[in-house]
Image (cartoon, rainbow, N blue to C red):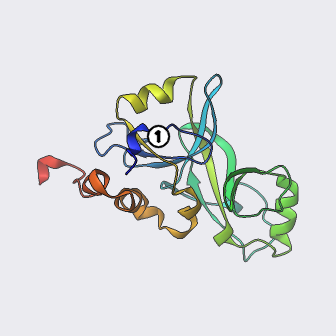
Amino acid sequence: MEDKSLIKPQNGSLLISEPFLGDPNFERTVILICNHDEEEGTFGLVLNRTSNLKLSDVIDVYNEAFDAELGVGGPVQYNTLHYVHRLQSLPQAVKLDDGLYWGGDFELLRTMIGAGLVNTEDIKFFLGYSGWTAGQLQEEIDKNVWIVNNDAANKLFNLDSDTLWRSVLREMGGKFKVLSNYPTDPRLN
């Protein structure tokens, strides 16, 4: 069995935070890496933090039946909108994994939503993002802040965001399955 702690991050990787990370922005989070460049840095989206906002709260939605929840992609530039989806035909989208894409032609996406060609099960929207400077993410991985998983990104639409952190660790098995059962505060155990 491959040691998951030795896997290097890449576009489409998931970062799973260690159980006792003290930063409230990243405590028990799962982050999808959308762009990883060792010289430029890393851009990712937290998958299991929700906001109290809907898409219609931040942009005009041309289809009242489509009002997706907005996730919190991270603490950087909270006034920016990002999205990951399963829409292979969306021009300019970046392929992250089989059946998983990031970004793309936003005006065409809005038209597709208005025409009822996109449903909320095929796309997730986020405000803000998570970012690392060149070398910073690898340094944090080396300090065991993050576990890298390159096998689960295409499943993110099938997992509940409330239990995503625990579900991904359990699926990884071995020592990671044990981590999934750690209490939030071991002093209360």
Instruction: State whether residue 23 is above or below residue 57.
Output: above
Residue 162 horizontal/vertical position (percent): 42, 63
Query: Label 1's element?
Result: loop
Instruction: State whether residue 173 is above or below residue 7.
Output: below
Residue 95 horizontal/vertical position (percent): 72, 51
Instruction: State whether residue 109 is above or below residue 10.
Output: below
Which residue occupies the foreground of this view, 14 or 22?
Answer: 14
Task: Say which residue appears at 16% left-offset and 48% top-offset.
Answer: 186
Count of marks placed on residues: 1
Going by the numbered disc 1, the residue's amino acid type is Ile
Determine crowd level at label 1: few under 14, some 14-19, many 20+ residues with C-alpha closer than 10 A. Answer: some
Q: Answer left or right for 80 relative to 29.
A: right
Which residue occupies the foreground of this view, 24 or 16?
Answer: 16
Residue 59 horizontal/vertical position (percent): 75, 56
Task: Say which residue appears at 22% left-offset and 54% top-offset.
Answer: 183
Task: Say which residue appears at 49% left-offset and 30% top-offset.
Answer: 137
Q: Answer left or right for 84 relative to 21.
A: right
Residue 21 horizontal/vertical position (percent): 33, 39
Q: Which residue is mark 1?
A: 7
In what quadrant of the picture does the C terminus appear? Answer: bottom left
Which residue occupies the foreground of this view, 5 or 113?
Answer: 5
Q: Residue furthest front?
A: 1
Q: Answer left or right for 80 relative to 181.
A: right
Q: Quadrant of residue 17?
A: top left
Instruction: State whether residue 122 is above or below residue 24.
Output: below
Q: Quadrant of residue 121?
A: bottom right
